[in-house]
Image (tube, rainbow, N blue to C red):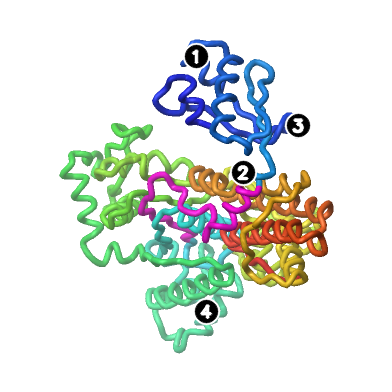
Amino acid sequence: MGAAAAEVAGAEAPPRGVALERPKNQAHGDFATNAAMVCAPIARDNPRNVADGIAAKLADELGDLLTSAEVAGPGFLNLRLSDAWYGGALGHVLGEDAFGSGVAPTPERINVEFPSANPTGPMHIGHGRNAAYGDSLCRVLKYAGHEVSREYYSNDFGTQVERFGASIAARAAGSDVPEDGYQGEYIDAIAKSIPGAAGMTAEELQHVGVEKMLAMIGETLTRMGVEIDVWFSERSLHQDDRFERAIETLREAGHIYEHDDAVWLRTSELGDDKDRVLRRSNGDYTYFATDIAYHQDKRQRGFDRLIDIWGADHHGYIQRMKAAYAALGGDPDTFEPVIMQLVNLTENGQRVQMSKRSGEFVTVDDLIDDIGADALRFFLVQRSHETTMDLDLALAREQSDKNPVYYVQYAHARINSILEKAGIGTDAGLPTAIPELHESERALIRRLIEFPDEIAETAFRRSPHRLTIYGREVAAEFSAFYRDCKVVGEADDVTQFRVGLCVAARSVLAQTLDLLGVSAPERM
């Protein structure tokens, strides 16, 4: 389409803004394009005249594959494609080993840091949303053609882990936890699991407790189907010279100055609203300084892009970190902080409260035990990460079409059952003949061939929730096809074509679910 429009307009390349879309009204054809209106200023002609030229060009190129190309309104072009074109489109889906993969225009080596929950307690639902989003994003980026490294940053240094160690020590000694410490049964369990804990110092218990908590977090992530490639310790930055080297890099670049006995970074010169403190007047370095050293370490590992998945309370942190990254010599456009919004649990219309310090909170493990990992993963990514969401536990448990993950998984299982009845395994040959198609067959094929574009958009926009929508759309189109079209028992050419369509739909659904970290069951 783009090439035809460019040739008619006399342009060297397809103009930006040319879109090929499915019209809302099926009477307007299979696809509609605004190419003529975009190209009219370039061609210095009336849009309808340009549309006529594009239609003629497409008719020459597509031949019998194009049934009609009609000019409508101010210059829209409505296209109707033949059954032979649809047959070729199905063949394209069936003919690729990993349909929709490798769509990244410029593959990059990307580091994605998530969920990086503090190792002072079990993972709660907010951590779970970060984990589900981060893992699905990594799967999509990798499928699109990028090289992806998944990294967990453990905040195992500083005040919060000191309080954690003091809390374990108190429980081991049979004492009350300090007022600013961590409560909850998990603190008791950790204290009891450490041999000789009562005779250990709070500092010793701090280190052992963090190790045990990270092991528990790792087990939770495994239950969610989340993979981590690198577990990075904040403490390690202070155990060698990486922290000091990062600060010296800033000093040598002239970005550091001293004022009121404190050390400051000139972030205001690099886009921040004010300068930021690196070392306080009492000699203590700030968390900001540690984060700078950490990102310098990541930058020196040779990644083309860094994606950090942060909590909702980090929005004000973005610009200062971008400024610091630029001060280190990095390209701030290749540093992408992603802010996750909050997630709320509801049960029978009531909010489920969570409080980490008091120990009265619902853990991710609790939720997996309740609704299952598949429902948890799907529900946690079905809304944009930029919006606050409610997770309806009652709906997540429901075994009906009202439950979106059940609906998509059931479509996959139903296709598998149809193919078993037809005696077809995992593969089906390409259709040798194209029968007259039902509109439901065309609609399903149109939806399936959108998959590569969905992968490209999902990767580009960092928006895995798009695939939950797409999965439901494929499931709906298949349900309509199954309602209108008998697969087994028809004429040989019809059955062969419809079996191939079932195989293609099953493959796309399975891949969509896999990118979401959700299983594709064969039976339900």
Please say whether residue 82 is one of the residues in the magenta stretch: no
Image-quadrant location for residue 384? top right
Q: Nearer the viewer, residue 46 or 286?
A: 46
Q: Earlier in the sequence, mark 4 or mark 3?
A: 3
When the figure is inspected, residue 325 is found, relative to residue 352, above or below; the finding is above
**Where does residue 313 sit, x and y in percent of width and height?**
52, 47
When the figure is inspected, residue 41 is found, relative to residue 376, above or below; the finding is above
Q: Amino acid at mark 2?
A: Thr
Q: Earlier in the sequence, mark 1 or mark 3?
A: 3
Give the residue at mark 4.
Answer: 190
Gap between marks 2 and 1 measured at Cα = 39 Å
**Horizontal side of residue 285 vs 423, given as left or right:** left
**Where does residue 245 sit, x and y in percent of width and height?**
20, 55
Give the structural element (helix, strand or loop) at label 2. Answer: loop
- Can you tell which of label 4 and label 2 is closer to the viewer? 2
Give the residue at mark 3.
Answer: 25
Q: Earlier in the sequence, mark 3 or mark 2?
A: 3
Report the span colored magenta.
87-116
Image-quadrant location for residue 66? top right
Residue 387, which numbered label? 2
Gap between marks 1 and 3 measured at Cα = 28 Å
**Horizontal side of residue 119 vs 521, given as left or right:** left
Q: Earlier in the sequence, mark 2 or mark 1?
A: 1
Q: Are marks 4 and 2 in contact (CB under 8 Å)?
A: no
Query: For mark 2, does the 10 Å Cα neighbourhood hold few (<14), some (14 to 19), or many (20 or more) residues?
Result: few
Give the residue at mark 1.
Answer: 41
Q: Amino acid at mark 3?
A: Asn
- Residue beneath the point at 46% across and 40% down: 316
- Residue beneath the point at 75% across and 69% down: 422
- Can you tell which of label 4 and label 3 is closer to the viewer? 3
The answer to whether residue 285 is visible is no
**Horizontal side of residue 295 vs 523, given as left or right:** left
